[in-house]
Every structure is written in structure tokens, then in C-alpha cells.
Amino acid sequence: MGLCDIFFLTSTAGLLKRNVLISFVLLIAGVTHAQYTPEQLKAAYIFNFAENIRWPNEGSRNSFIIGILGHNEKIINDLNDFAADEKIKNKPITITASDSVDDLITSNILFIPRVNNQNIKSIFEKIKGKNLLAVTEAVDDKKYVMINLIPGSDNTIRFELNEKNIIEQDLSVLPDMILLGGTTIDLHELYKESQRSLLTKEEQIAEQQQQLDKLSSDLERITLEAERQRNLITKQTAEIFDKQNRLDLKIKQLDSLTSEIEQQRQQLADQQALLDEQVEIQNRQQLEINSKKTELEEYTRRLKNKYEEVDRLETEIDEKQSILDKQNVTIATQQNILYIMILIILLVLSLIFLIYRGLRNKKIANRKLEEKNRHIEEQRLELERSYKQLKELEDFKETMTDMIVHDLKNPLNSIIGLSRDECSKSDLKVINESGKKMLKLVTEILDIHKFEESKFPLDIQNLPVSNAVVESINEVSVQLNASSIDLKNKVPDQLTAKYDLEIISRVLMNLLTNSIKYTPAGGEIEIQAEHEDNIVRVLVSDTGQGIPESKITTLFDKFSQLKKKKYGTTSSTGLGLAFCKLAVEAHGGMIGVESEPEKGSTFWFTLPSGDEDKVDDVDSLPDIAHIGKLKNYGFSEADKITIKEIFPRLRKCKVFEYGKISDILEDLDENISESVEDWKNDIINSVFANNNIRFGELTSDEIFTNKSEE
């Protein structure tokens, strides 16, 4: 047992409390390391390394983490045994293992078994700069080690130390480290020696490159000369083509040889790179370079032979050129005979042309006559089409007039019938809705005309989209209640756009009215809005009967329903969607619909996006739930009992489930007090404003204890 081994066992005796007696016997008797397993020796080394390294902020550390790359159960068990009894710098120890380096980055010490040596470079790059001490095993490339364990043939273990890499990890080596039996790697001298060898090899390669450049220049000159000779050879001589193909083949062979030389040069460069990494294989690389040099000389000799072959081919080309000159004389004689034949043919063609021109003039006269007859027929068909269009326009005008009268007649009948006697509150709502329908029809006819003539002024403001949504919901609330349809308002409060509040509110009202009209009772309508690049997309979806694909293309045309149905089955003029299209396009946006029969429809339109930080003030904003403290409603005991009866159902509803909330509120007695009526209206306002916080406050017991209102 050497001196280093004795010191190692002495320094590790404190760590091996469970084997104190064994360590003492080893020191006295001088027994070999065979009494300990290799894993126990490695574990002891790792603990000693940790004790002899100065760590950043080691005084403030709570514990030391030792990571093992892989799952070597023996060394993990030995390290756990040590960790149970010992501490590093008076700190507790945690042992962790994983197959991934990324999972072990937070360790203080990382043991990398030799099975991972083929990936040591990539592992070293991942842990570089992480204040982490890497302990490797039998790594040959010393650039990627910090402390490298080297097992001996006699069951001993020594180690080598790359202090440069340890310092780069912001760690420092204590003086006692080298006493453990390690050696320091002198990479600086190794690097200088490899650089001197590299310079010598570069000079040799530069000389070979000059020779290669000269050969390439000669080859290029020969190739150009051969190309010029090939251009003089005509297709009449098959043998010359054969020689040319052979010449091309030789040139390809020369190119192949040049490519092989380039590959050999690249191999030499790769070998030089290896010289920077391993000094032990320099002699073998030198032998390989000499071998490649011999091969290069052999390739040069073969290239010279190819040049001689090219010279021979050039001589053959000259001989073929002589034969070609003789053939050219024969061709010139044949050309003279050809000129005489051409003259005779021209005379015959002139005679044929005179005959053809006479026949063509006759055909032109016949064609002009046919053209006049066809023009007369087209005029007749055009007159028939014009008459048919006038007839259709007259029918359309009559149908449209009947439709407008029909749409105005129903609201007028409601107003007249309900206003004869004393009106109830519900009658007044119906009268109000009927008047709104009449006004809406007249307004849409006028506004469409203005939009089409570009005479409609827009009051563009930077406003939350929810303002228009709440106003439109207010307008259709009576229809929603009558239809038992659940309306969900999912428009974010903070989403803004640039639009005319009145116009876009009417657009949304038209879309909601359309959805209510074609959605069965118990169905659902949902309003959403989303930000896309520089636009805001607003969507109104329903679970109605859907729209056939054949009708979608004309859905936004004026009086589109008149074109599809007769008056007796049509319930509106179709002006609402036409107004929506013109209004959205006036804002610079687009409108469309996606629908599938029996599965519902989604109408959408776009508006320019706004600035959330610069919202404009408006004179009249939609009614929303009270924003200050809760009101003092002044409920009586009877009022409290009435409200508490519906509290459980209200608390189960989401704020956007307008239909369910409206149905629950309708269950209240018609003769409720003014306090309950006021509370009911605030509930509806919070739903319209999509104010979940206010909705929760209004359905809490706090409304019964509040004494004042701010």
C-alpha cells in the first residue's frame, strides 16, 4: 500500500464509522484495498472531495446535494449509508439519482460513471458555470474533467485534478486536496505541443494545396480546349460523338479524382483537430498523414496519365476535323442544287396562293352574312330578357310593398288593440315593443339608403365593446323573456374597439333578434368578443335551426327573403341583415355567418381595435349594476322571506345565464314591494353588465344587514 493510499484511508476513516475497525486494521497491517469494494472507495473519495473544495456561500447553505447520473444501486446505497452518519462541512447530505443531467443541475457534486463517457462533452457543456463539482471516472479527454477517478489494476483508485475547470465553476481547491493522492493535469503544455504540430501539418497541407491548385488550373485549361473542339464537331459523325462521350467520361473521372483528393484533405484537417484533444495518438496520426501523402502522389501520377490520354484524344479530334472539312465541301454543292429546287417551289406556291385568295374572299362574304343574322338574333333575345327583367322588377316592387305593409300592420294592430282600454304594465311593454318594431323598419329603410349613398355620418369613439352589448341586450330583453331562451354574455369588460355606439348597438340588436326568432324555447344564445391582431371580432352564436348553405351567399342582400319566399309565408323584409352589412363595412370591418342546419348559427363581424388606456367619455352609457357600496333597500320581514326563497336557485346561476336568472325572477309575486322591485332591477343590470362581483353581492345575506348607501 502506497503513501497516498494510506493517507486516503486515514482521511476517510472518519467517514466510515460503520467500518472503523476495518480501517484501523488496514492502516496497521498494510492490507490492500481489496478489503473495500470499488463503490465504497469511490463514495469515500466523493465525500473527501466535498470537504476539500471551497463553495460559494457555503456558510449559508442548509445542506449538500450529491447527484449520481444513472442508477448504480451499489454506489447509491454506499453514499446513502455515509449520508446517514456523516455531514459535509457540518451540513446534512442529500443523495439523488437520475438518468437526465437536467434533473441534477441543482446538485453540489455530480458523480458521472464511466458508462456516460461517450457523452462527456455534452454533459460538461450543460453543467458549465453551475457552481457544480463534477467527479468523472476514467475519462480520456482531460478538457472535460474537473476531478477524474482512475481505477488501477490492483483494485486501487487514484485521481487527477483539472484545477482550471474547477475555478471556472466559481469553486476553489483547498491545499489538502492534493494530499489525497491526486495529480494535476498540465493542459497548457499539451496545448502548446499540439499547436506546434498543427503548424507543421498546416505547412504540409498548404504545399499540397498549391500543387492541387496548379493541377486544377491545368485541368480547367484542358477542359475549356476540349469544349471548344467539341463545339466544332457536328452530329453527322457518329464516331466523333463516341469520342466526345469518352472524353466526357475521362473528365468526370478527373473530377472524381479531384473530389477524392478534397476528401483526403478534409480527413487530414479532421486528424489535425484530433491532435488538439489527445496527445497520445499524435504518432498514429502522423503515420496516417504520410500514408495519405503517398496516396496523393499516386493520384498525381494517375492524373498525369489522364493528361496524356487527353492529348491523344485531341490528335484524334484533329483527324476527324479534316474529314469534316471534306464533308462540308460536299454539303456546299448540295446547297446549290437545293436553292434551284426552292425557286421552283416558290413559283408553284404563288400559283396556289392566287387560287386560295379567291376562295377566301368568297368565305369572308358568307361569314359577314352569317354575322348579321346572328346579331339580329341576339338583339331579339336581349329584348326578351329586358322584358322579363321589367316584369320581375314589377312583381318584386309589388311584393316588397305588401311586405312592408304587412310588417307595419301587425305592430299597429297591437298598439290599437291594447290602447283602447286601460293598459296594464305588460300591455305598455307590448305597445312599446310594437312601436319600436315600426320605428326600426322605417329607420332601417332610411339608413340603408344613406349607407348606400355614403351620406351616413358615423360618430366613431374608443369604447368598451360591452357598452354596445349591454344596450342591445336591453332592447331585446322582452323577446328573451317571452322565448325562454338562455342568453350568455361572455364579452370581457376591458376589451375596447373604435365604433359608433348607436349603430353597432343596432347591429347587435338585429343579430340577437334574428337568433331569438330562429332558436326554439329552452335554447341558448351566446355573445363573445376576442382580439385578433388589430381588429376585434364579435360573435353571436345560437342553437337554432341553422341556415342552408345555398342561402348563405344572399343572406345579407336587401330584401333577400323576398327572393326566397312568397309574401304569405314571410315574416320580415330581410332589411335587418342588409343594414348590419352596410353598417359594419362603413366601420371598415367585415361580417359573415357560419351555420349548419339543425345545429345553430354563428354570426360574426369585425371592428378596428381600440386603446384600453384611452376610453372616450360618452353622454349616455348602458345601465349597469350599482358599483359603489350596496344600497340600503329597507326590506321588510316579508320582503326578506320572499327573496330568501329564490336565493338558493340564484346562487347556482352564472352571471351570463340571463335566461335562467330571468325565469327565477319572474317567479316573484307580481305585487312585490318597491324595495324588492329595486333589488330585482339591480340584479338584471348586473347580468346585462356581466358584473359577476355585483351579482354575487346582490345574492348574498349582506343586502339584509347594509344600513347605508354610498
Image (cartoon, rainbow, N blue to C red):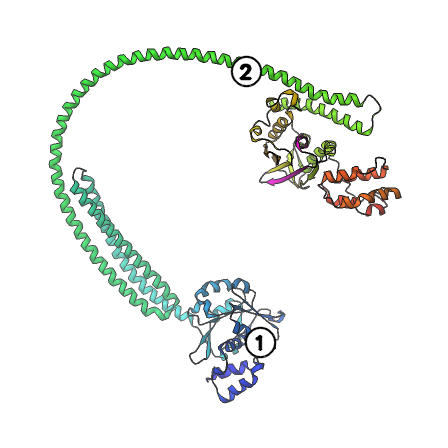
Residue 521 lies within the magenta run: yes
Q: Is residue 456 above or below residue 89?
A: above
Q: Is residue 218 above or below residue 674?
A: below
| N-terminal-most mark, 1 or 2 | 1
Q: Is residue 124 above or below residue 477?
A: below
Q: Is residue 472 above or below residue 386?
A: below
Residue 115 spot, x, y in % from top left: 46, 68
| Amino acid, disc 1 | Asp
| Amino acid, disc 2 | Gln
Disc 1 packing (10 Å; few <14; some 14–19; many ≥20): some
> Splitting the image into 4 quarters, where does residue 319 fall?
top left
Q: Nearer the viewer, mark 1 or mark 2?
A: 2
Which residue is under mark 1?
81
Which residue is under mark 2?
389
Are dots 1 and 2 in contact, CB under 8 Å?
A: no
Residue visible at 75% across and 36% down in the picture: 623
Please indicate, yes or no, whether residue 558 appears anywhere in the rendered image: no
| Magenta extent | 510-534
Residue visible at 76% across and 43% down in the picture: 695
Q: Secondary structure at mark 2?
A: helix
Relative to 293, 130 lies left or right = right
Q: Secondary structure at mark 1?
A: helix
